[in-house]
Image (cartoon, coloured by chain):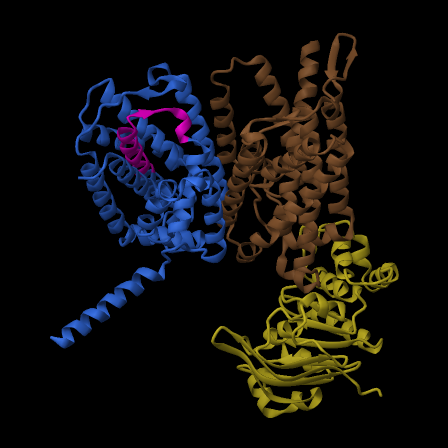
Amino acid sequence: MLSSSMTLYLIFCCAFIILVWGALVPFRAGLLYNGTVYCMAVGGYFAAFAAKDLGWPFWLCILGAAVVGAILGFLPALGFSRTSGIVTAVASMALIFIIQSVIRNLDFLGGTRGIRGIPKIEHLLLYSVILVVVLGAFLYRLNHSKLGRALEAIGTDPDMATTLGINVKVMTVFSLTISSIFGAVSGAVYAFNMRTIYPETFGFSLLLSVMTMLFVGGRYTQWGVFISVPLLWGLPQWVPASINSFTQIIYGVILVVILMARPEGIITRELPGRIQHLFARSKEKGAGTV
Amino acid sequence: MEQTNVLKVENLSVYYGPICAVRKIDLEVNQGEIVALIGSNGAGKSTLINAILGIQRARGGTITFLGQNITRLKTERIVASGISVVPEGRGMLADMTVLENLQLGAYHHKGDYGPMLEKVFSYFPILSDRKTQKAGTLSGGEQQMLAISRALMGEPRLVLLDEPSLALSPAYVDKIFQFLVEMKKQGLTILLSEQNARKALQYADRGYVLDLGVTVMNGPAQELAVNPEVKRAYLGGE
Amino acid sequence: MESFVAQLIVGLATGGIYALLVLGMNLLVLVRNIVHHSYSHIVVLTMAMGWLTLTHTNGSIPLAVIVMLISAIIFTIATEPLFRPLSVRGADLETVTLAMGIGIIITEFISKYINGGANFAFPDAMTGRQNTISIGLISFSMANIVVLVGCAAAAAILMWFLFKSKEGRAIRAMAQNLRVAKMLGIPFGRTGVLGFGIAGLLAGFIAILCVMTLGAGSPSLGDTFAVKAIILMLFAGMGNMKGGLFSALFMGVVEAMALAYLPGRWTEAVFYGVIMLVIIWKPNGLFGNKH
């Protein structure tokens, strides 16, 4: 049986893997979208409110969070279909400040004190893993579909993508909405794991850790998060207590070093192909000896 | 003493990754002459000019300018040593004024560039009239005048021109070339690349014919202009 | 009415500091085409250096000022090599993230080592907040006036440098067309370091003005400034010096007025909402992109 702190840690990892995947979808289209974190707050608060005050069961909460996240992510996405690059990155940062401020002012969401005492969910780890598998499979299908290639084309060169008959605006809205759904689901998992939620969580520092995870793991494949999220979440637990207080600085240094030394992140675009190739070869070898 | 080498390129090779753009080219430019590089698109003319300027690094060979090996120098050192360029497509700094473009041409000018500015304005009075105008608002021909004037501002020994006749009306092409001949008479040395082989050979002293990165022919311009092969391939003649 | 004028002056002083931050960051946009998100953090780190000097020596203010100016220049130039490989590739999202990483490091450093993470207050002798001037019923602190004049002077000098000097012209040429600028013989490395150096000097000056108006620094100040500065940059148009100047002054005044006259609860949400809508409405900024 896993210790309770380990369980807690693994569930956080699941939540953040989903969150970083959410940020990854628009990145394929060349957009650094901070609205994923905004939808994480939306999803987290929705799930907390629905579970505690309305008594909804877990899966209904997740579904509800996804739907609300999709709706509240779709609306700003309409606006962001006009912008690109750094403009999107910064303007979507404003969404985070807005949602924080709104939550602080809504009394039924607990204001600055947040919502405490969210019901405990049995087998939450199992459920989170199921969510990671399902969403991971969905993302894999998306990346290897016509839509995924269209996003890739937009990321490479929006003007060229237009000439290929891709509707850049529609695809942008689509990718941002998907990203919002991922964010909302991760927020719900996060809320059930923490069992308490308050607006300060969804601030600038969360945004920075998401970005660190995205850039360190590798933002061109969906596999990098499996390295970067456990590593960066686990860092405070694994390093000796004497340097524990330096974790934020270590995050910063890791981010800077990775960006300079390995701009694509740990898992680069070529790496999965190369690993596949390696496996295929060893299989051939195995087959040869039999 | 008159026939001194200003620029000497020996055995120069330039690669873009694995692709060879210029292969073992030899070239000489003497004091006070106009040398034309002719050849079709992709023959390596622009690559050669960029390599001389140090923008594209040479993989092999040497470039000597006024007896000094400049092969590995940074572009800014090369420009400072007395080579200036009229880039392909004129390279206007469109949002800056005509005057600012000219002042930037004199970036490496040691002393006072005022007299040179006066001189340039006397060649092209229209630039003087429009000196506070944005360079992007000039017509194509005026932009080419500005680009050439800008290249002269640093009082260089050698001017490189990359496709000076590109997108210019025939009347302007003649005007530009006549101006270059005028400059030559004042002692300037000029190396230009040109797709318009007929015009280039009409005004140049010597020519080099490039094809797929190698020199296929070179010699005095009048001889090249009547060479049957050159005629057939580049002059569209009989 | 009297309080309105006083608020206006406070707002203009705050706006002036924002303006200088935006000018410094825009200068770096021109030099290296990067959004130096951690420029504000460097300003706060510079304040911290000044505070350290004051606490560890006998509190000599001229010494602190010199230390601040020099350390700001050193810090800013030290970041230039970090950005160079990415700015050559033109990867703007990566450069913003890199700058944010630098920002984290600086913020955490300050919260660890400067006054144990608490606010670090400067002595009154340096802040000049005690000296107030009264004209009729209006009274305001001397510091605000000094800051306003200082901002105007710094902005004017920077504008003169960019638009009238040889190196300023070279920087603008690099921003407009790096390839042509190189062909004209403008040294990429040296001009860039010069640009960073000037931005650093400006950062030191901003830090001094911040000490005068705020009287104290805190670890989170860098993030606060950074977000406002980057939003203002987009609001006005990236690399647009004059647009940034006006937007910053405007924002300072609006902020001061909102603090004074609007009920607090929804101000922030409305403020960021409006900003976001404007940015979406005009992706190139209200005054247009300059590169």
Q: Which residues are magenta?
A: A180-202
Which colour represents chain A?
Answer: blue
- Between C79 and C63, the one lying in front of the other is C63
Quadrant, the C terminus of chain A: bottom left
Quadrant of the rendered image containing residue B175: bottom right
The yellow-coloured chain is labelled: B
* Residue C149 image point, x, y percent: 77, 28
Q: Is residue B131 left or right of residue B223?
A: right
Is A94 drawn above or below residue B124 in the view shown?
A: above
Helix, strand or loop for the magenta stretch, by majority: helix
* Residue C217 image point, x, y percent: 61, 29
Question: Is residue B67 inside the magenta stretch?
Answer: no
Report the residue that reaches farthest toward the left: A290
- Between A289 and B137, the one lying in front of the other is A289
Residue drawn at point x = 33 percent, y = 38 percent: A177
Question: Is residue A185 inside the magenta stretch?
Answer: yes
Q: Decide if residue A82 is in sight here.
A: no
Q: Is residue A211 left or right of residue C68?
A: left
* Residue A45 image point, x, y percent: 32, 25
The brown-coloured chain is labelled: C
Quadrant, the N terminus of chain A: top left
Q: Is residue A162 left or right of residue C248?
A: left
Is C156 drawn above or below residue B128 in the view shown?
A: above
* Residue B139 image point, x, y percent: 69, 57
Residue drawn at point x = 68 percent, y = 25 percent: C213
Quadrant of the rendered image containing residue C124: top right
Residue drawn at point x = 51 percent, y = 35 percent: C279
